[in-house]
Amino acid sequence: MGEAEVLRETETSIPHVYASSELMAVYTEGFIHAQERLWQMERLRRVAQGELSELFGEKTIAIDTFFRHVGLQKAARESLPNLSPESSLIFQAYADGVNDYLSNVKFPNGQTGKMLPPEYILLGISEVRPWTPIDSLSILKMLNFHLSWNWNQDMMRELLSIIGLEDMVEIIYPFNADYAHNLVTIVGDEDIQGTRFWSDATLSERYHKTRGTQPKLTQAQQNRAEEKARKEEEKLRQEEEKLRLEQERLRQEEEKRLQEEERKKQEEEQKKRQEEERLRQEEEKQRQEEEKKRLELEEKKRQEEEQKRQEEEKKQREEEEKKRLELEGKKRLEEEEKKRQEEEQKKRLEEEKLRKEKEEQERVQKEKEEQERKRVEEEQKQRMEAERKQKEEERKAQEQEKQRQVEKERLRKEAEEKARLQKEQEENERKIKEEQELKLKQEQEERRLQEEKKKKEEEAKRQEEENERIKKEQLEQERIKKEQEELEKKRKADEEEKARQQKEAEEKEKIRKEKEEQERKQKELEEKQKKQKEQEELQAKKKQEEEAARIKKEQEEERLRIQQAETERLRQEQLKQEELQKQQQSQKAEKSAEQAQEAKKEQVLPPQMDQMIHLDESQASNNWVIHGNYTKNGKPLLAGDPHLMNQIPSHWYLMELNYDSKYVIGATYPGIPLVMMGKTNNNAWTTTSALTDLADIYEETISPNKKQYRVDGEWRDLDQREEIIKIEGQDPLKLIISHTHRGPVIPDQVFQGAEVFFGEGAAHLKTEGLYSFAWTGHTPKENTMDNVRNLMNSDNLHDVLKNIDDKGYYSVPQNILMADNKGNIGYYLGAMMPKRRNQTPFSGCRVHDGSNSDNDWDGLHDSKDLLRVINPKKGYIVTANNRPAPEHSLFDIGATSTSTIRAQRITELIQAGVDKGHKFDHKDMIQIQNDTVDLMARDLMPYVLRIANNFKSHLNDTEQPLAQQAIDKLLFWHGEMDEESVGATIYAVWQYKLYKTLFHKFSDDNEVRLQITSNYPFNDFIQRLIRIIDQEPENQDLNQICEMRDSTYKGKSSCSFNIAKALAEAIDFLTVEVSQNPKDWKWKNVHVNEYPNQPWSLTPFKFLFHRETPIGGNSNTIRVSKYSIKKVDQLKTFKSFATPNYKTVVEYAEDPFDEIMLYSHDGGQSGNLFTGHYHDFQSGHSFGKLLKGIYGKAAVEQIAHQKLYFKKDTEQKLEELSQEQQHHDHSHAHHNHQDHDHSDHSHDHHHDHNDHHHEHAHSHQKTQRKNNNQRKNKADEL
């Protein structure tokens, strides 16, 4: 397998492993985990496999029964053959490291025997079962199950329905955005728009559309909803206006372009017309000259004819006149004259007709030349005026012409003027008509352009859809091709595996036959020597028993002596501390009362509950990452702190692994290989619980004989398996566990064993109910190691996501937050998400009817369906167990959880810095991790104080001044839950007192009532309740939740009254339980982080191993410190059971040598009290003092350290070559190695010398092994 060198930091005991291969690094990790945390690993595998009762007796039967029903060990066994070859080798290498430690430890004095951790001695365990890959897989399955927690909320919703609150279920335990307060999601709508995750309709809209329902809103909520809708409508209107303006701008630009083209066209036409006009004018001039000559000739001829005619007429008239005068007299002459005038008038009309015909011809000519008509008309007018003047001159020249000619000329002018006016009128009408036609043409042209633009857009959209279709077809073809290739590879691999197995079977058969032959010969030899050896064996056995008894007695005496000495020393220290505490107290009576109260607390805690608090109860975590755009050095910043249950030793173990020119440093989890959260050459990552809905509960209809269940009207047979639980001091318990096609059948009472996780216990359903449990963790697929190696070995985040999509994600559900040295930040929602047949969003949030297969699953979602984002637009990502999916998510994956106060606060702090232009660094990250502001408390307090001030008059005379005192204390308090705050203490007690007043109308069970208030979704409800009650004090739906049967208040505003009364009760509680002096009400005086040790915290030695730290914070602060209200009811104090167990900050830099890695956990590296590293991190960790991560051999060699060398040959043997200690001896026991046949005693050699002012103590241990094992090489380097 290879070699490894371990450099262990002297000050912190953090090991740095430098191995020749990845398998050797994992092997060494297993060895070190067993060396430091063996009992922790033992306890974890026993919890997961349901084997606690073998050690603890009947107290843990409920826990074991629950986990045997869930079947974590069964799931682990089914996953083992489905591991990738690389994962199988890693699990086996880790187990080999653990087992080689178990088989080679000795007492410090060199005696043969196993030095197990003291927990084993306390529990009477003399042998440790070898570690197997199944054990690590069982722990992984337990972590998976631990974080698949939504099924407990499904049970809580069912409980609310059972106690009569069906109409309020979605309000009290919301699972969609309708009733979520200040929803902060990990991924925003802006990050998924335009991707495969986007849906135009929101999850809430699709949920209500499918159900045909509407969210239930109060009037105040309706007003807010309308205001929100109005703002959205205004926003939409603004966007439409913006779009309209943009379209108008484009239209104007188009018009301008068209006008420019028209102008150019008109200019060209104008030039052409001008040329034509010039030619026409020349022709017209020539024609006019000819016409003028013709007219002059005609006029001259006419004048001559007229003169001749006039002379003839004159002569005739004279003759006629003479005759008329002579014949008819004066009257007749007048009539003749009139007749003559009429004839002249007729003649003039004839002439006028000819003239009009001529003008008509000219008008037709002008209509043909539309654009130059006005100019032609002006010239015609000038010509006519010239003719008129000429005629007038001619008329003047002919003075002899009489008044008749003058009258003739006047009439002609009048006719011409009339014609001119008529012509102008026609010209005006023509212009108006032309303008109308031009306007109509412009409108038609505009419509045409719009239609053309619309057609172009439709064509572009169609082309885009066609391209998308082609792209999808190509992707589908690639996928099919890839699947075919994978199938072909799998077929070839199966054939190879089959051939290999056949070959192995043949070899095994050969070995078996050889072994049988050897056994036969050996048996014959033994039979021959049997009589001879019987006597010798009896004598040897007697001697061995006597020697074993003597050694055991000496060991027991030595152990007791050491233990008594250490106990006495620590007891003396404890007595000194107690004496110091007594001197600091002002009154001896108060001290006695506190001692009595402490004794009372120990009696109140039932044994099983004391047991439960030491197991995992919390699923909280924080992490966030900031892009280089908002950091001082332009590189990403990553911070994280998971929140598991407090315990000592810590859940985590700090370590660096180096192999193949790669390194990874961070947090390991004893019992599981590799590094769970850390930093490598290229990437850094942290995780939080995703809280995705990975399990469903089905109420089953079971037949009377308990062998069948009903689905879709038909009876199906139940599968059954047998489980045996060994119980210390009792006979084993036999369980027959039934299975439906969905999963194991779990009775309601068995679910109560889940209290090991939730602290408050699972919600009770129907007493005799039988429920099947469907959970994606039951799938045989498992690739946690592959995913961790992907994070460790990928070059960048894009490769990480690509590899996940290629291999799938079959591991623990978690939010994976990442940064790389290329400057990328990213997020991936890792989960095995079921495909629910009922595709209504949030369909998995209630207990299902098991008799209807429509509620079943259709396999798992592909990993490509899981949310992810790289370099989001806002420049940072925050996950704090808040909802991952935004409202426009296509799937409800990660959408069933709500926001958290911590997520809101982290986002608030980061966004405030971004808005101010602040540039973040690692110090800012630590400051955010240490923040203790409860955002819910800060924002609710103005409403609470206003309600209390309005309703304190309903309190009795004793309560009113107490309520006023609380109001005065909280008036200038803004949610700071720091250690010195008195306001924090009053708020915490007020919250506890208020929650105790809820749900009395619906349940008489105090535990059930407090249980309802102890889940994340309840925060959303309580914020809505107080805000609504402030506006609607008599809200009927909410006040029924606050009604109490024994309350003195009988009005319609029970919630308002309870809010005021709880403030008074808070002051009374603190006065009685803490101190009469309000200065002593500091939060640190009543609130501690409790770190229990299993099993020592359950023994009289608790004072040695148990740890408590006064601290600030609560369940809503970033520096979380979660306590149980139910336990406050029992203990009268606030003991937190979940805090940030591991903290890390990573700051990338341009130069890798300038990168910063900070980390810490909440205990010490060792699980052994006597090593000096049992809890040395705890104090600094609690207040944000992180350790600098030192990585790389050259850097570690610059600090004080010890060295340990390992060599593992190809036949799975371990040889410890040498050990070098610097500065001081390592406090752990030296480990020699023995094979199964014999062992050699070790000899220590000490040499002192001076090297660079450092003193080195050398000790060499050499061991010679005999090889009697013919196993083949099981593993090479990956």
Image: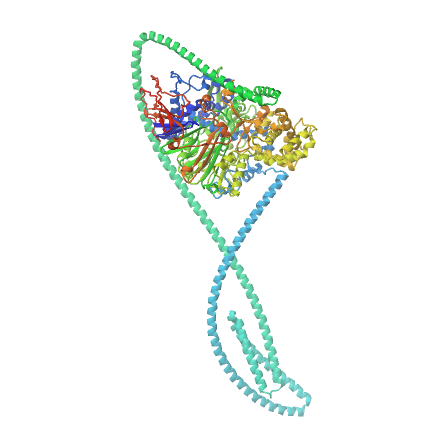
Residue 1129 relative to residue 815: left or right = right
| Image coords of residue 501 (percent x, y) | 33, 27
| Quadrant in the picture for residue 401 | bottom right
Q: Please tell me which residue lies in front, 571 or 1028.
A: 571
**Image quadrant for the N terminus?**
top left
Which colour scheme appears in the figure? rainbow
808 and 604: which is toward the camera: 604
Residue in the picture at 47% in, 74% down: 280
380 shown above or below 503: below
Whole-percent x, y for residue 585 in the image: 59, 23
Q: Is residue 117 shown above or below 872?
A: above
* Left or right: residue 1012 compared with residue 1196: right
Q: Quadrant of the C terminus?
A: top left
Image quadrant in which you'd find residue 215: top right
> Is residue 585 at all visible to an observer of this figure?
yes
Q: Say which of 14 and 267 sits in front.
A: 14
Where is residue 1088? Give x, y as percent.
Answer: 55, 26
Looking at the image, can residue 810 be seen? no
Q: Is residue 5 above or below residue 939?
A: above
Residue 18 image offset from top left, x and y in percent: 37, 30
Q: How many marks?
A: 0
Residue at 47% x, 64% y is 264
| Nearer to us in this view, 1154 or 241 | 1154
